Amino acid sequence: MFKNIPIITKDMIIEKAFKRASKINFPKKKLPLPIKIRDKEMKRVEVASQVINSMLEKVVKRYPTFEHLDPFYREIIDITVSLDELKHNIGALSWGMKTIQRIKNETIRKMKRTRDINRLGNLRKEAYGRYISVLKRIEDNMEFLNSAREKLKQLPEVKSCYTIVIAGAPNVGKSTVLHILTGAEPEVRSYPFTTKGINIGYFEYKYNEVQVIDTPGLLDRRFEERNEMELKAISSLTHLANLIVFIVDPSESCGYPLEEQFNLLEDVKGMGIPLIHCQNKSDLKYIQDIAIRISAINEEIDPLKREIFKRLDAELDQ
């Protein structure tokens, strides 16, 4: 979504705009020399403004309309770069475009009215100077947007389809389950809430695409231990998840005792999202309280698949 937003700087715009304008020559029509000079200078002023506004417009228009975005994207954008700051800086570029257009119109009117041919060059230079002043005014805004682009282009490109989120303590086998479910290497994308990144995979079920997300670092601590950013992360996931698969490691080889894992499970249950509870590493140890037993490392997850497919049948046939 954000990869196609160009990076621009004041110097880059100035160089391109004035270089393009400098290539404007006298019109080839048979006209009196004073008219040719006027036409040439007006065209230079116009071309320079067009190049500047074209470069600014590419940034402004390639940002999405935030009000129409999925709530998930709005929230992670806000956490990553601040939605209000982003809107403010995009608005500054829009102001710059309008101001450049106004300067161009004012200069063209002056050029059409003047009878002093020698003044035309000065009017063009004056317009160029004003163009540069506008670009200096919005230079910080361009720098902010360049930085924001680098952060935002790393966001995961989730799809609007049925979504399963895999939750559980670290090292319980979430990524392995994701890999087996999707039948391919998961797509790894960085995420603003964690340095570990998230994994995304897909599989097809009865002609429906199902999205599976593994979220390391997001659902691994109890709610009261999370900071504000982590809590927003959990909130944003509620916009995506149609189903949560919560995995417990009864062997505790993940490094987390069962008590902590079950405490985390209670937190996840509190999110109010449909949930499947299963135990992994059942080849090492299992507990009677959890009916669905799998061994992801041995690719034995059929009981989990059957439960997922049963839920999909109920949801997708509606």
Image (tube, helix red, strand yellow):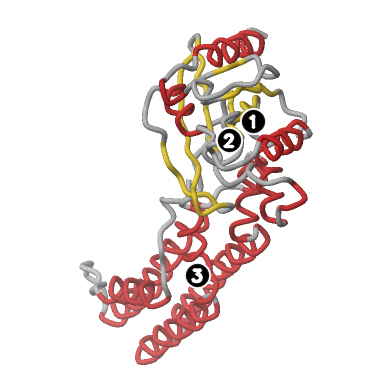
Q: Amino acid at mark 3?
A: Met
The mark closer to the camera, 1 or 2, is 2
Depicted 270 relative to depicted 148: above or below = above
Residue that numbered label 1 is attached to: 241
Lateral position of residue 171 relative to residue 266, left or right: left
Q: Earlier in the sequence, mark 1 or mark 2?
A: 1
User: Mark 1: which secondary structure?
Assistant: loop
Real-space Cα separation, disc 3 to disc 1, in angstroms: 35 Å
Q: Amino acid at mark 2?
A: Glu
- As helix, strand or loop, the secondary structure at mark 2 comes to loop
The answer to whether 228 appears left or right of 282 in the picture is: right
Q: Residue at x 61, y 26 (%)?
A: 245
**Location of residue 239 in the rendering, given as x and y in whole percent from the top left corner:** 68, 36
| Residue found 38% across the figure and 78% down from its top | 11
Indicate the secondary structure of the residue bearing disc 3: helix
Q: Which residue is mark 3?
A: 142
